[in-house]
Image (cartoon, coloured by chain):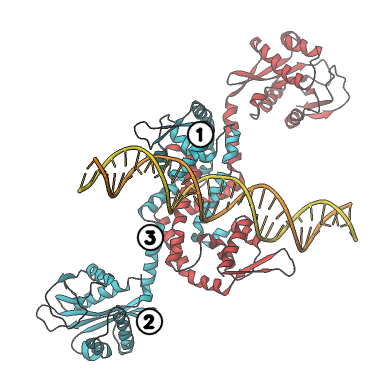
Chain colours: A cyan, B red, C yellow, D orange
Amino acid sequence: MNFFDTVGKMALGSRLRLLTDKITEDAAAIYKLYDIDMHPKWFPVFYVLSNGAAKTITAIAKEIGHSHPSVSKIIGEMSGKGLVKEKKDKADGRRNMVSLTPKGKEITEKIKDQYSDVNNAIEEISAGTRNDLWKAIEEWEFLLEQQTLLRRVQLQKKARESQDVKIVDYRPEYQQAFKALNEQWISTWFKMEAADYKALDNPQGYILKNGGHILVALYKEVPVGVCALIKMNDPDYDFELAKMAVSPTVQGKSIGWMLGNAVIEKARSLGAAKIYLESNTILKPAINLYHKLGFQKVVGRITPYERCNIQMELTL
Amino acid sequence: MNFFDTVGKMALGSRLRLLTDKITEDAAAIYKLYDIDMHPKWFPVFYVLSNGAAKTITAIAKEIGHSHPSVSKIIGEMSGKGLVKEKKDKADGRRNMVSLTPKGKEITEKIKDQYSDVNNAIEEISAGTRNDLWKAIEEWEFLLEQQTLLRRVQLQKKARESQDVKIVDYRPEYQQAFKALNEQWISTWFKMEAADYKALDNPQGYILKNGGHILVALYKEVPVGVCALIKMNDPDYDFELAKMAVSPTVQGKSIGWMLGNAVIEKARSLGAAKIYLESNTILKPAINLYHKLGFQKVVGRITPYERCNIQMELTL
DNA sequence: TATATTTACGTAACTGGTTACATAATTAAC
DNA sequence: GTTAATTATGTAACCAGTTACGTAAATATA
């Protein structure tokens, strides 16, 4: 049983490297076969110079997809062998104009046969496969350019984790979590106020009974986030979004986003037209989230909380 | 225009390396994303140890396709992080038995999610391509195992070059070459004898007129090999294969082989039943060639040439 | 039983690339 | 016309692998 069959795609990089090594391995011997005094790694540089034009180090690097120090080293080696000549650009003293010497040009002739033989050998291998490696690489290059592997893995992670997240209605057994989660973030940034204790100790009496709602985010059945919709006695607003708290242990799982959306959805289903909230600008991620949820800044309302220095609303 | 589109398959190795780098690049960040303290390069080693069994350095190396120093280094690093423990084998003092520590085993649990997310991300990319990279690599591995790239290129070279080789009948303008090619090899190994000069200076009179034939190998229209079929006045043999010479400048192009086959074919077409030849055992490549052409050693004939110490025949 | 060969493994040096950093020249901006 | 930013390049250090080599232990052989 092949190692890579059991280990799976996680080792794709490793497997690719081994194949690369295997293909590269023979390269030096192939040049020798054609009696050409050139290192395989010089080839891309050699190739882009072979039309005769002089080019700068960085231009070559960009063209062949290497870093410039790599090209710089290769040019140094080729220069030592007399295959290329370097010349400072008169017009721009930084530029090192590189071009093939007559000796280098000789090789362009010599290499033609090798070039066609290698091409044919590879085409022959390709003809013997059902999946085209060359085209597959091309497609991967394209897709990875669109979105890196890291980003794709991040999205997979998020998708998987969001399956473990459920948003449920408040039940008495969540009171502990409701209080603890809020207490945690409030006391790291501010001081608990009297109004906090009232609502957190008795959500039943202060929120639910008055026509408010609380939603709880469960991660693997454990409450990790909470958010309340408090019924407002105000002609302008139906509900206040408040007491939103997400445990820092589950960061990066978009739980705040899911919770926020669920709360807004709940308000909408209750026929609400406008939601209001109060926060503080030092809570940047929170303000960001509210913004992403569609809330806009408003001014001029009075508030019982000392820590409030920004007010926002959302029109449904 | 993409560099690789213009440069062709010759840069396959280079292109593969770039893709490998791109895929590997994100690997470290991915481990970080899952809060796993492990270098991507450790993964293959980690994986083969994850079933719990202790293994030797070389066994691991063989399994994952690395060299043993590579595994040795990786184990050293993992050991430093407390992920594996090393223990000398009691029964065999050379063996260094390596296994996961409890801390290492913890990671096997933690890594499961990452493993499945990466697999999914890669599967997702694959689903977006028309050519399956994973399978293509597999096929290439298989085909390169059958025959290395070097060998395949060699065969292409030979095939191409043999197209430049033509075997033609002797014409007077080849007399110079006939003499020069033979003189060259004879005088490097032996001394030219009287019988040599007679035949080489006047092939018309000494070979062709008596019912013999001479074939000439042209490489790019230049005579580079010759071989004579000399009519024998003998009840046992029809022809003697003699004066075979190939220029050392065209070695490795199977010209001797092509010439030999052409001469045998010529004899056959003339209704011959047996061909005879004389040579010397210090000419190893020549003896080898005769052998490959089907000649067998015989003994007991007399010969005018001092340098002859082996005699061979071929029954058609 | 002494000796030669094979095996396991570590260390050192090399390879073909990279990133990080320094410097000099050019160009842009106030 | 200074000053700041950008560009071109080289050098140094690193990285993940390799090969080459040396040593010790085990095994085969005469």
User: What chain letter is assigned to the residue under label 1?
Assistant: A
Q: Is residue B2 visible?
A: no
Using the image, determine if residue A26 lies above or below residue B243. Answer: below
Question: Crowding at label 1, few (<14), some or many (≥20) Cα neighbours within 10 Å?
Answer: some
Disc 2 element: strand
Q: Tag 3, which chain?
A: A
Q: Which residue is mark 3?
A: A151
Q: Which residue is mark 1?
A: A79
Label 2, residues with CA under 10 Å away: few <14, some 14-19, many ≥20: some
**Residue B31: image location, x then y, percent:** 46, 64
User: How packed is label 3: few (under 14 Cα within 10 Å), some, or many (20 or more)?
Assistant: some
Q: Position of residue A70 (x, y in %)?
A: 47, 44
Q: Amino acid at mark 1?
A: Ser
| Real-space Cα separation, disc 1 to disc 2, in angstroms | 67 Å
Amino acid type, callout 3: Arg
Q: Residue at x 38, y 76 (%)?
A: A249
* Three-letter code for the amino acid on which mark 2 is drawn: Val
Mark 3 / mark 1, whichever is N-terminal: 1
Which quadrant of the figure has residue B195? top right
